[in-house]
């Protein structure tokens, strides 16, 4: 057959060989905005190195291989010894080595640590979101560990290390560790108070043995896990290491790995504790929820950041495709209706990134110690994290689906990468408390913590007077907050308004005028439809699309 019949034309080149950080003005502006001047040059340099790696052909291939070759459970070795290990493709370990080496488990102890880590997490999650799970768990475990200073002294330096060490050995012998979490059980799910795993005290203070099961254990190949179990005084938090100090394996039986919709590169497991599983208490007996909530809140923010990363990668792929693809007499990106769709996607992506990075900055400010500013930031996090987690993760799936459609049939093909993003997109809405849990948590903060509402109103109040649609939305929110009748049934509606008003206020303060104008018109002013691509045609849509476009070297 003549070769000319196979000439390929009018196809977009792969989006590869670019700096994921520097080609994202929303993210670079956020890092510049939220870091102290003396930190900016160093952090920018580090993120450029990471961004170039994340956009490289080699690291993109690692992400594809890790997803295409899911982990495998090995319960026994060749001789019949129980080992309960999870085997991963080498690409998985390379991704974790790159991300741990970039400090993506190290935020709590260095200036601007949460902002720089959040930016790096957003960058590397665009390569393969699955490897973000152990990074998130390890990072988030630190505040829980600090409830037990002796444990924190041993485990925190290893958890925040920039060295990835895959082999299971005692913590004293490892330059770096990963930490996981096991909270939910078959009969309880999100209602962890219904947990039945038992913790029996041993003679040594703070030592216990556990008996029970966990329906979801995150990152089961980790070096240790934070676990909730029922001690004599009630639900308590424990640290369960995989390898004990003498080098022997702890009793930690992995029953099976979950066969998930997406997140294929990452292992999630069901595990059993047989009554001899050794554990160390973390915090007080009976205060397990209070102890572990710091970890849960930090992982919830990572759900926001992870969804923002999926959104950013999806819109980058869509705009890139439409810039090269021609149809009906010209490039797709120049078609008015397609431009509206792309602009709307870019708007949603920018709002998610700006909100996630603002919350990361709040973590940095809240960790500075006492003072009214730090207290206010802690209070803001109490209400803004569940609101952001609820809304941003909910918006991720329809946005990624619309971005896929921009590529037409090409987007529905696995090789485009968009199906992988789409399968991943619902995950962050489910993990660390699904939508109802987040909405009820936000409402609980409104009802029981006046400082949280005050901090929220101060935050959005900083933008009052700049846009009449935002001002009207704030007034409407205050009216809703004044009426607490039937608030549980209204929790989703109220949490959605909290998130939208907060996003609008942040964009009015910090985004280019055309972005803030579009958001306030479509998301707050009611001048937009239910689907993407329904922005008012009078807006500067071209500017929104160009702001989201990735310039690849050689373009």
Image (cartoon, rainbow, N blue to C red):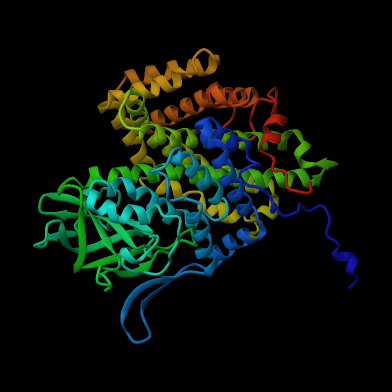
Is 423 placed above or below 5 here? above
Residue 274: image x %, image y %?
20, 69
Q: Determine the residue positioned at 36% across, 69% down.
A: 168
Is 447 placed above or below 251 here? above
In the image, taking residue 111 as reference, residue 489 lies left or right, namely left
Residue 509: image x %, image y %?
54, 22
Q: Quadrant of residue 3?
A: bottom right
Q: Determine the residue positioned at 66% across, 42% down.
A: 23
Q: Which one is nearer the viewer's eye here, 227 or 171? A: 171
Q: Quadrant of the N terminus?
A: bottom right
Let me know if residue 487 appears in the view: no
Residue at the extreme front of the image, as rendered: 38
Q: Which one is nearer the viewer's eye here, 336 or 474? A: 474
Let me know if residue 152 appears in the view: yes
Q: Determine the residue positioned at 20% across, 48% down.
A: 283
Q: What is the count of numbered marks? A: 0
């Amino acid at each position: 057959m003549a070769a000319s019949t196979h000439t390929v034309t009018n196809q977009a080149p792969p989006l590869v060989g670019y700096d994921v950080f520097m080609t994202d003005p929303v993210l670079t502006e956020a890092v510049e905005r939220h870091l102290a001047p003396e930190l900016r040059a160093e952090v920018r340099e580090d993120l450029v190195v990471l961004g170039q790696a994340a956009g490289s052909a080699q690291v993109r291939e690692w992400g594809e291989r890790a997803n295409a070759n899911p982990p495998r459970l090995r319960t026994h070795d060749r001789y019949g010894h129980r080992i309960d290990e999870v085997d991963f493709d080498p690409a998985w370990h390379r991704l974790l080595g790159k991300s741990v080496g970039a400090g993506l488990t190290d935020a709590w102890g260095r200036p601007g640590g949460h902002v720089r880590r959040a930016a790096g997490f957003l960058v590397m999650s665009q390569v393969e979101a699955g490897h973000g799970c152990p990074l998130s768990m390890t990072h988030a475990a630190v505040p829980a560990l600090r409830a037990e200073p002796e444990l924190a002294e041993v485990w925190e330096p290893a958890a925040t290390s920039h060295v990835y060490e895959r082999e299971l050995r005692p913590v004293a012998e490892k330059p770096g560790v990963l930490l996981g979490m096991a909270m939910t059980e078959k009969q309880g799910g999100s209602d962890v108070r219904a947990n039945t795993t038992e913790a029996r005290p041993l003679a040594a203070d703070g030592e216990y043995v556990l008996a029970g099961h966990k329906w979801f254990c995150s990152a089961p190949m980790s070096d240790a896990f934070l676990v909730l179990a029922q001690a004599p005084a009630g639900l308590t938090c424990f640290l369960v290491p995989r390898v004990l100090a003498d080098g022997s394996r702890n009793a930690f039986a992995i029953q099976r790995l979950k066969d998930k919709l997406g997140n294929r590169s990452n292992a999630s497991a069901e595990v059993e504790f047989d009554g001899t599983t050794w554990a160390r208490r973390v915090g007080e007996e009976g205060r397990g929820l209070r102890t572990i909530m710091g970890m849960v809140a930090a992982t919830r923010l990572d759900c926001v950041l992870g969804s923002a990363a999926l959104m950013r990668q999806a819109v980058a792929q869509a705009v890139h495709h439409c810039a090269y693809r021609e149809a009906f007499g010209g490039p797709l990106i120049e078609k008015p209706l397609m431009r509206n769709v792309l602009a709307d996607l870019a708007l949603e992506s920018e709002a998610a990134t700006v909100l996630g990075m603002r919350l990361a900055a709040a973590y940095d400010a809240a960790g500075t110690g006492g003072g009214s500013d730090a207290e206010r930031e802690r209070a803001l996090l109490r209400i803004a994290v569940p609101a952001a987690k609820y809304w941003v993760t909910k918006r991720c799936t329809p946005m990624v689906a619309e971005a896929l459609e921009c590529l037409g049939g090409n987007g529905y093909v696995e090789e485009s990468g968009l199906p992988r993003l789409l399968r991943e997109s619902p995950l962050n809405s489910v993990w660390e408390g699904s939508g109802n849990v987040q909405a009820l948590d936000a409402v609980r903060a409104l009802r029981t913590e006046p400082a949280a509402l005050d901090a929220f109103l101060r935050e959005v109040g900083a933008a009052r007077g700049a846009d009449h649609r935002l001002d009207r939305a704030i007034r409407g929110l205050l009216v809703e907050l004044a009426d607490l009748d039937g608030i549980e049934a209204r929790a989703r509606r109220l949490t959605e308004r909290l998130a939208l008003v907060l996003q609008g206020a942040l964009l009015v303060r910090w985004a280019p005028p055309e972005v803030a104008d579009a958001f306030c018109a479509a998301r707050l002013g009611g001048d937009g439809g239910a689907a993407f691509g329904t922005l008012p045609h009078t807006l500067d849509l071209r500017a929104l699309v160009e702001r989201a476009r990735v310039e690849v070297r050689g373009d």
